[in-house]
Amino acid sequence: MSVLTDVVHQVGDVLAASPTPSGGGLPDLGSGQAPPGSDKIVQILKWGLWAVSIACVAGVLLAAGRMAVQYRTHGGGGEAMTGLVWTLVACVVAGSATAVVGALI
């Protein structure tokens, strides 16, 4: 269990050190004033991004494990490769979410 704890801490350190687009905040919404309590909503969104990032890392690791097992047992790994591609697409979408929303506003 300590290995899992170490991995989670290392992933958290990497996520904390990685740069975020536009300073990590929300897109510029003009000169409007945020409603009371909006800082709590932003905090929940940041937690969601953190959870999605952990899920993406876990998805890549699981896809790599599936590829290794399928290659060893069936000589292939194509199904796991498809899972890896979709996991990487999810990583790109999650990483560019604020930029996409900013472009649409």
Image (cartoon, grey):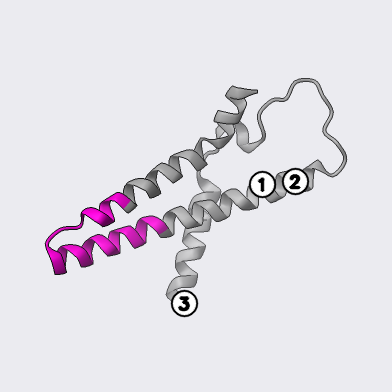
7 vs 84: above or below:
below
Secondary-structure class at tag 3: helix
**Mark 3, other Cα within 10 Å: few <14 / some 14–19 / many ≥20:** few
> Could you tell me which residue is drawn at 58 percent across and 48 percent down?
49
Name the residue tied to disc 3.
2
Disc 2, SS: helix
Secondary structure, magenta segment, majority class? helix
Image spot of residue 100 (x, y percent): 55, 29
Using the image, tell me which numbered label, if any, was put on residue 55.
Answer: none
Residue 11 sits inside the magenta stretch: no
Horizontal and vertical percent for residue 57?
A: 43, 55
The kind of residue tagged 1 is: Leu
Q: Can you tell which of label 3 and label 2 is closer to the viewer?
A: 2
Which residues make up the magenta segment? Answer: 59-82
Q: Position of residue 85 (x, y in %)?
A: 33, 46
Q: Residues within 10 Å of mark 1 (few under 14, many from 20)?
A: few
Q: Which mark sits nearer the N-terminus, 1 or 3?
A: 3
Find disc 2 in the rendering and name its residue. 41
Q: Give amino acid for label 3.
A: Ser
Contact? badges 2 and 1 (CB < 8 Å): yes
Q: Which circle marks residue 45 in the picture?
A: 1
Foreground residue, 74 or 52? 74
